[in-house]
Amino acid sequence: MEWQSIETAPAELSDSDNEPPRLFVWVADANHGKGDISFGYVYKRKNGTRRPVASGYGGSHQWNITHWMPLPEPPK
């Protein structure tokens, strides 16, 4: 698996009843600029803009989420 640009991540309309796919996301400005991996989602708005979200990175700060990677398959 390779990191991909956040613009290519699967997304779901924010007002949809469907939950967007859970992903790994890269929060570039976390950890004092060193970056951090988090679970995340990407929501799509009706106007076509996308809003990536990272678990544990909420609040009023606009986090710089730049990349995503699919989660691996669970163990069998």
Image: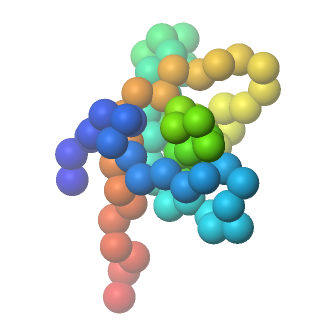
Image quarter (top left, top right, bottom left or bottom right) of the C terminus:
bottom left
Q: Residue furthest left?
A: 2
Quarter of the image holding residue 44? Answer: top right
Q: Residue furthest bottom?
A: 76
26 vs 30, left or right, is left
- The colour mode here is rainbow
Q: Residue furthest top?
A: 32
- Relative to 73, say whether 43 is above or below: above
Identify the residue shown where x is 54% and y is 11%.
32
Identify the residue shown where x is 60% and y is 53%.
13
Image position, residue 45 (x, y; %): 61, 41
- Relative to 48, say whether 16 is above or below: below
Identify the residue shown where x is 78% and y is 20%.
60
**Residue 52 visible in the shown view:** no
- Relative to 73, say whether 60 is above or below: above
Image position, residue 27 (x, y; %): 49, 28
